[in-house]
Image: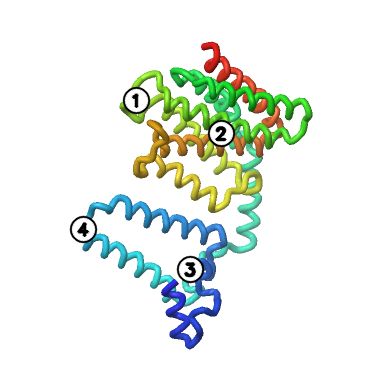
Amino acid sequence: MIGVMGQRVLEGRSPFVGDRNHIHHRLLSFGLNHGQAVTTIYLVHGLMVSCAYFLRWQSDVLLLAMYLAFAGAVLFVFALPPGRIRAPRASSSTQSSRVVIRNVSRSQSKREWPLNLLYVTVPCYLAWAVTVPQNIPSEGGMIAAGLAVVVIGALLSRSAIAWVVRAVLYIGSMCLLYYGEAFPRTSVTTLLTPTNMAMVILGALVFLAIRWAGDAQFQTTPLDHLIGLLAVAMPFLPEMTIGDVSVGPLMAKAVVLFFAFELLLYLRSSAAIRLGLVSLAILTGIMWRAWWS
């Protein structure tokens, strides 16, 4: 903000008159598109937050040096004339050939294997997650019963099935993740637990499925990239807890599952009904564990 206002003053204009000299517009003038510009800003902010966290116990001299380095980099961007750095543009023939190659590669069935594997592993993971907690409180059974009624109503009425299943999966999976962390069968002393390893595998499948689906099938936004970055960073953030449960790892696992749900519901036309039936089975398992197990 100071850089923008200072530039306006140097150009003899009011510092409060709007223009296109903000950092976002400067990045656009260098050849980046909107998504790339926003992603760059997010990454820089994430880098600054990470530096603030990891350098919080360092000397003031080092902190001042880092601050001056960031400030200098931002001022350097404003000092460059617009269009000085511009991404190379391919010729029309090259672009058309790339489109053909991309379309052919997307049509290949081998690119579908991460999504097909998610189609199988997500229900299996949810079924296994029911067995992870040592016990599930009776309140969890009541929540599961209420969600089961909603799912049955949606499946019978064929109304808003995808949205109902999505909401039930979100709520039900969060409950399972929380119960698994709050009531573990054994004390956890390492990060290499079966639950964490399974979540890493799911995360890799989600990444590959998004990467190979392409924007034509599943379009991601800079906000999605930011959420993915947060999912990676959350387990390493300062300790935040709900009772005895650490919030960071819990939210990171939830983000992976939510992306998996969205991929299946968006890219598989039959996924809504299938996941609705899966959610009914999972909710039945939760009720059994809560009331009779």
Q: Residue 59, labelled with which disc?
A: 4
Q: Is residue 206 above or below residue 190?
A: below
Q: Nearer the viewer, residue 269 or 61?
A: 61
Q: Are marks 2 and 1 in contact (CB under 8 Å)?
A: no
User: Which residue is rendered at x = 60% and y = 42% of the image?
Assistant: 213
Q: Gap between marks 3 and 4, in whole Å?
A: 30 Å
Vertically, is 33 above or below 276? below
Q: Nearer the viewer, mark 3 or mark 4?
A: 4
- Circle 1 residue: 188
Give the amino acid type for the residue marked by disc 2 in the picture.
Answer: Pro
Q: Residues within 10 Å of mark 1 (few under 14, many from 20)?
A: few
**Dot 1 and dot 4 residues touching (CB under 8 Å):** no
Q: Position of residue 128 (x, y in %)?
A: 51, 20
Of tags 3 and 1, the one toward the viewer is 1
Considering the image in quadrants, where does the N terminus appear?
Answer: bottom left
Q: Is residue 211 visible?
A: yes
Q: Amino acid at mark 4?
A: Ser
Q: Nearer the viewer, mark 2 or mark 1?
A: 1
Tell me which numbered mark, 3 or 4, is placed earlier along the sequence.
3
